[in-house]
Image (spheres, rainbow, N blue to C red):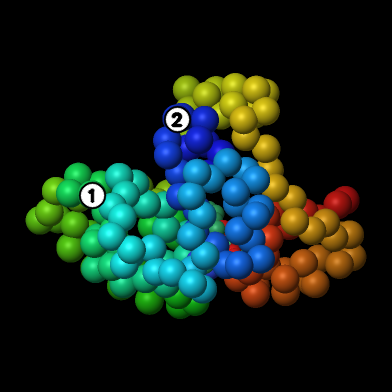
Amino acid sequence: MQIAKSLGADVTGVCSTPNVDLVRSIGADHVIDYTQEDFTRNGERYDFILDNAANMPLSSLRRALTPAGMLVPNGGGFGSRWFASAGRLISAMMSFRFVGQRLGRFLVAKKREDLIVLKDMIEAGQVAPVIGRTYLLSETAQAMDYVATGHARGKVVISV
Ligand SMILES: NC(=O)c1ccc[n+]([C@@H]2O[C@H](COP(=O)([O-])OP(=O)(O)OC[C@H]3O[C@@H](n4cnc5c(N)ncnc54)[C@H](OP(=O)(O)O)[C@@H]3O)[C@@H](O)[C@H]2O)c1
């Protein structure tokens, strides 16, 4: 969200009701509450979708992309089993092969010049982590349980 805004994009965030204000506060131009509205069925088309949830069929995501739009399936949420994740990824690679839409990389490609841009954004205050909860080291198991709910708010920090 913050990186896209820093680059000048018009950004739509998708989250549940309790997080609408938070997402707006970090710069979203538009916020869609997924408990009220399906962003793949509202008639909007997006140039870029970063899919953190992976709970939508690929056909729905493609419908929400512009003709030359790009989908980046950001790992997790693909399913708890590696096999399910791999299956979805292979389907995505096949279905994007014959259309103008693009499937972006989902693994981090560390490049010095990109990290410098990120550093500049952080130093300019354009990008800052949203820390939801902080746990003591001895509470790491509870922290992991919270993350495993799939609804942790912002980042979860262990203080050492
Ligand atoms: N590719 C990579 O290199 C890489 C690296 C790290 C992480 N990841 C992946 O990036 C994703 C985010 O990481 P994370 O650590 O922040 O995971 P996380 O803690 O599981 O993410 C929780 C967030 O997901 C939101 N969420 C859950 N269901 C959603 C839905 N249907 N639509 C929109 N938002 C939804 C929750 O908001 P609500 O409570 O409002 O639903 C919550 O804010 C994960 O899928 C993770 O596996 C990928």
The picture quadrant where one finds residue 120 is top right
- What residue do we see at 60% from left, 52% from top? 23
Element type at marker 1? strand
Say left or right for 41 vs 139: left
**Whether residue 61 is situated above or below residue 105 in the rendered picture:** below
Question: Mark 1 highlights which residue?
Answer: 66
Quick one: 153 or 103, which is closer to the camera? 153
Task: Identify residue type, mark 1.
Answer: Thr
Rendered view: 47 above or below 34: above
Few, some or many C-alpha atoms within 10 Å of disc 1 (few <14, some 14-19, many ≥20)?
Answer: some
- Residue 1: horizontal and vertical position, in percent? 53, 44
Q: Nearer the viewer, residue 61 or 76?
A: 61
Position of residue 130 in the picture relative to residue 115 (left or right): right
| Dot 2 crowding, Cα within 10 Å, few <14, some 14–19, many 20+ | few
SS under mark 2: loop
Locate residue 141: give its quadrant: bottom right
Q: Is residue 81 above or below residue 77?
A: below
Task: Tell me, for residue 8, which label it has, or none.
Answer: 2
User: Residue at point 62% right, 43% down?
Assistant: 26
User: Is there a contact, CB below 8 Å, between mark 1 and mark 2?
Assistant: no
Answer yes or no: disc 2 within 8 Å of ligand 1: no
Image position of 119 (left or right of 139): left
